[in-house]
Image (tube, rainbow, N blue to C red):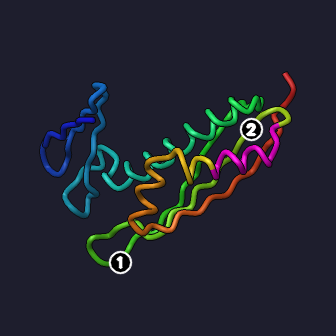
């Protein structure tokens, strides 16, 4: 996997992924940024949520669960000292569907965290305490 990051002025950077997608990153105004893009640490958190949500959707679909929506809300704590690494992250999944079984959602979350989600594994091995929770919402009949 490859990527590039190019300085575009101030404390803003344009990142380009191997697949050609671009993301603008910018620092906070307190550090000279103009709030034109996500902070790099925010992108790490977003990557974790995306990786885990991808797994949850894929696993639940394979388990023939009628999922209509999955959201992952993340709360993170960082160290006070520099480097201000993540110390704790909580992922809360909101799974909407018809007849979705809580047992299947719980199983999907554990499979993602313990086996499939590279971001979760990397962060937890680095000392981040990662916890998970979920709720299942019954979708309205169509």
Label 1: which residue?
Answer: 80
Q: Circles 2 and 1: CB distance less than 8 Å?
A: no
Magenta stretch contains residue 84: no
Asked if residue 11 is positioned above or below residue 80 in the image, the reply reads: above
Helix, strand or loop at mark 2: strand
Label 2: which residue?
Answer: 96
Q: Residue 138's spot in the image, x, y percent?
A: 83, 39
Which quarter of the figure has residue 1? Answer: top left
Tell me which numbered mark, 2 or 1, is placed earlier along the sequence. Answer: 1
State the predominant SS element of the stretch in magenta.
helix
* 79 on left or right of 132: left
Q: Residue 60's spot in the image, x, y percent?
A: 69, 35
Q: Residues within 10 Å of mark 1 (few under 14, many from 20)?
A: few
Q: Residue 114's spot in the image, x, y percent?
A: 56, 53
Helix, strand or loop at mark 1: loop
Which residue is at 84% across, 31% downward? Answer: 140
């Amino acid at each position: 996997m490859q990527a590039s990051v190019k300085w575009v002025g101030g404390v803003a950077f344009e990142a380009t992924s191997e697949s050609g997608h671009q993301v603008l990153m910018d620092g906070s105004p307190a550090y000279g940024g103009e709030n034109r893009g996500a902070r790099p640490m925010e992108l790490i958190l977003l990557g974790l949520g995306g990786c885990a949500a991808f797994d949850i959707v894929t696993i639940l679909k394979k388990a023939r669960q009628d999922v209509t929506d999955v959201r992952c809300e993340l709360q993170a704590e960082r160290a006070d000292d520099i480097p201000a690494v993540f110390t704790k992250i909580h992922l809360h999944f909101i799974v909407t569907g018809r007849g979705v079984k809580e047992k299947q959602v719980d199983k999907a979350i554990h499979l993602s965290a313990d086996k499939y989600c590279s971001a979760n594994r990397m962060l937890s091995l680095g000392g981040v305490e990662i916890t998970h929770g979920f709720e299942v919402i019954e979708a309205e009949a169509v």
